Image (spheres, coloured by chain):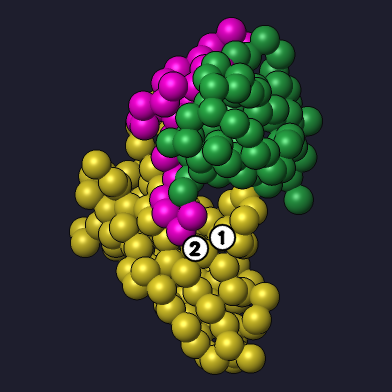
Amino acid sequence: SQQGEEDPQALSIQEGENATMNCSYKTSINNLQWYRQNSGRGLVHLILIRSNEREKHSGRLRVTLDTSKKSSSLLITASRAADTASYFCATDGGAQKLVFGQGTRLTINP
Amino acid sequence: EADIYQTPRYLVIGTGKKITLECSQTMGHDKMYWYQQDPGMELHLIHYSYGVNSTEKGDLSSESTVSRIRTEHFPLTLESARPSHTSQYLCASSELGASGTDTQYFGPGTRLTVL
């Protein structure tokens, strides 16, 4: 069964606004990762947060992790047109594998 | 940008043909993966490898096969392609860490269409 589920499935905002995406998972994890995928391309790693961390920042990205609720959020501040992409959360599925959610399709309107 | 390459980028073939999708990485990573992804959908792991001569089936059943004769090379083969194999195939690699799950680096993908 699917480990990570992103919410919302699609998000459309104006350039300059903040975008928040959420991820819920079912079983205990060692870490959670966020990836970005531009249309028709491979995935690019954005950020990894370990189970003993609650918040992490990287540039305009802010990730939070709540292990008690089995959820994570990705915040992109001051969005730009180039941020238009699909965003996936991924959790460790055992045997050093990753399990990906369905992704959130983010559209930044100019 | 990750040093992981996939060829071809696009492939349109007829039913029953044998095809091999190539994946190579120059990062010296031990672990490599193949995912299948339909448009707008999640990734499904179909094969992975911990190193040379190691191959394992993933979470999604697939009629494809893989081999790992060299560290840098992880080709995927379909002996007889069918329209149901139409999808995007993504290759990835990561370092073999002591514990936990490492960051994966993805190739650009091969979009396969079987007529």
**Which of the two labelled residues, at mark 2 and mark 1, occupies the earlier sequence position?**
1
Q: Colour of chain A?
A: yellow
- Quadrant location of residue B50? top right
Q: Residue at x 50, y 74 (%)?
A: A106
Count of marks overlaid on the render: 2
**Residue at (41, 51) in percent of width and height:** B42
Residue to which mark 1 is pinned: A36
Tell if the residue under mark 2 belongs to the same chain as the one under mark 1: yes
Evaluate whether residue A6 shows in this view. yes
Residue B18: which numbered mark, if any? none
Q: Is residue A78 above or below residue A96?
A: below
Q: At 51% across and 40% down in the image, what residue appears?
A: B86
Q: Where A36 sits versus B72, above or below? A: below
Whether A38 is among the magenta residues is no
Q: Residues within 10 Å of mark 1 (few under 14, many from 20)?
A: many
Q: Are marks 2 and 1 in contact (CB under 8 Å)?
A: yes
Chain identity of mark 1: A
Identify the image quadrant of residue B104. top right
Name the mark on residue A87.
Answer: 2
Q: Nearer the viewer, residue A26 or A9?
A: A9
Compared with B20, A70 (above or below) is: below
- Chain B shown in which color? green
Instruction: Give the residue at x 69% y 27%.
Output: B22
Task: Give the x, y percent position of residue B64.
Answer: 49, 22
The segment highlighted magenta reads B39-66
